[in-house]
Image: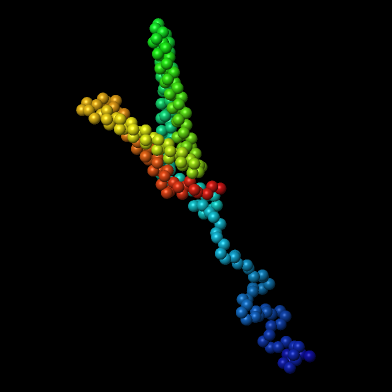
């Protein structure tokens, strides 16, 4: 029996690959390279792994400019209120010490009462100063509650500044307004502008997206 016999059904036919020759893939099946297994393709329809702005999971979202400005204003207002509270406490202690040595018991009692009132007002002002300072400190990692806290503080700041501004405008309506009234008018106008700035910086859509960002 010869391999070259064309009449032998068990022999190797011409044109057919034998041992040592690459096998021809059937029609419709993609050829495979050597003995390598076909590579599996990634399943279709699956969403990409979520990532941050930096292209990797957990990337920090930058703080919008309005939120950053509101944070700085909150720090400044809180620090000024804290300094005002300290000043009132010192003033109260000064009043109490000055009138304590008075020979008149009435003056001594009045000085002690005024000094105590200044000290209490200063302590309340110091406690109130913690609100904007803590809110500003938590704006970087805070959620919606910190944002609401800042908006409420800005609203109260604008409200009291607006009331004080109207009072100063009424006092300065005369031809010769005292210089103290004019200075107070300028400061209340600045305070009103800062309160509105806090509200706008924390209430816009960019701030909303920032406080709804995923945190990893």
Q: Nearer the viewer, residue 184 or 63?
A: 184
**Residue at (53, 54) in percent of width and height:** 51
Residue furthest bottom as drawn: 7
> Percent from the top left, x then y, of residue 32?
64, 74
| Position of 92 relative to 104 (above/below) | below
Q: Quadrant of residue 8?
A: bottom right
Q: How many numbered tags mark residues here?
A: 0
In the displayed structure image, the side of residue 1 where residue 215 appears, left or right = left
> Percent from the top left, x then y, of residue 202?
42, 43
In the displayed structure image, the side of residue 33 where residue 134 appears, left or right = left
Q: Nearer the viewer, residue 42 or 3?
A: 42
Q: Nearer the viewer, residue 201 or 108?
A: 108
Residue furthest top as drawn: 103
> Percent from the top left, x then y, of residue 109?
42, 12
Display colour scheme:
rainbow
**Residue at (42, 20) in percent of width and height:** 117
In the displayed structure image, the side of residue 26 where residue 184 appears, left or right = left
Residue 94 in view (yes/no): no
| Position of 14 relative to 215 (above/below) | below
**Residue at (45, 35) in percent of width and height:** 132
> Percent from the top left, x then y, of residue 91?
41, 19
**Residue at (69, 88) in percent of width and height:** 14
Q: Nearer the viewer, residue 59 or 157?
A: 157
Residue furthest left as drawn: 175
| Position of 77 relative to 145 (above/below) | above
Residue 20 in view (yes/no): yes
Q: Quadrant of residue 185?
A: top left
Q: Quadrant of the N terminus?
A: bottom right
């Amino acid at each position: 029996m010869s391999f070259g016999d064309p009449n032998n059904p068990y022999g190797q036919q011409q044109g057919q690959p034998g041992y040592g020759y690459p096998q021809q893939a059937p029609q419709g099946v993609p050829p495979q390279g050597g003995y390598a297994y076909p590579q599996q393709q990634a399943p279709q329809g699956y969403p990409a792994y979520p990532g941050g702005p930096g292209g990797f999971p957990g990337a920090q979202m930058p703080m919008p400019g309005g939120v950053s400005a509101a944070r700085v204003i909150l720090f400044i207002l809180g620090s000024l209120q804290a300094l005002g509270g300290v000043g009132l406490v010192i003033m109260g202690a000064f009043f109490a010490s000055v009138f304590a040595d008075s020979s008149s018991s009435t003056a001594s009692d009045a000085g002690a009462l005024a000094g105590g009132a200044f000290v209490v007002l200063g302590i309340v002002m110091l406690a109130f100063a913690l609100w904007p300072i803590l809110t500003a400190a938590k704006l970087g990692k805070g959620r919606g509650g910190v944002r609401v806290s800042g908006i409420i503080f800005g609203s109260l700041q604008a409200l009291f500044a607006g009331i004080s501004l109207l009072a100063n405008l009424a006092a300065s309506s005369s031809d010769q307004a005292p210089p103290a009234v004019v200075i107070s008018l300028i400061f209340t106008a600045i305070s009103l502008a800062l309160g509105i700035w806090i509200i706008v910086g924390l209430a816009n859509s960019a701030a909303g997206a920032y406080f709804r960002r995923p945190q990893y």
